[in-house]
Amino acid sequence: MVGTWKILDTPECKLPEKLSTAFNDLLDMDGAGYKPMLYAATQLVAGTNHLIICKQTIVAKEPIEFLVYVIIYEDLEGNFVLTRIERIV
């Protein structure tokens, strides 16, 4: 169903190859590192949103770690855009 999040039947830590490449490119940021922990859900829109649970490590003298969710949008041509990073409370 369009617009509804679909929890994956077999969520995994391993991202599909194209999504993994996009994840690494989009989340290559100074000051924080991201490690995918769970590829959890997808949402069919005019393309696909991918929901990934990650460990975020803030680079500091004493690194700080958080659990976050990341949403990456994939358009109909296979291009990827980072749309959201949100801390899980």
Image (cartoon, helix red, strand yellow):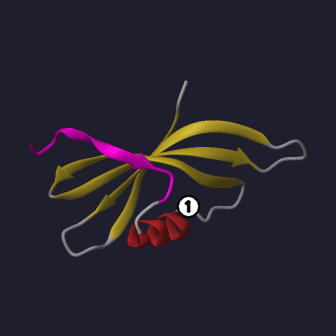
The residue most toward the front is: 10
Q: Residue at x 50, y 65 (%)?
A: 26
Q: Position of residue 68 (x, y in %)?
A: 54, 39
The residue most toward the left is: 1
Q: Position of residue 49 (x, y in %)?
A: 29, 52
| Amino acid type at image mark 1 | Leu
Instruction: Name the image quarter holding the N terminus.
Output: top left
Instruction: Name the image quarter holding the C terminus.
Output: top right
The residue most toward the top is: 89
Q: Is residue 55 left or right of residue 53?
A: right
- Magenta stretch contains residue 82: no
- Give the number of marks: 1
Which residue range is magenta in the image?
Answer: 1-14
- Magenta stretch contains residue 8: yes
Q: Residue at x 62, y 53 (%)?
A: 34
Q: Is residue 53 left or right of residue 71?
A: right
Q: Position of residue 44 (x, y in %)?
A: 18, 51
Q: Quadrant of residue 82?
A: bottom left
Q: Is residue 70 left or right of residue 32?
A: left
Q: Residue at x 31, y 72 (%)?
A: 79
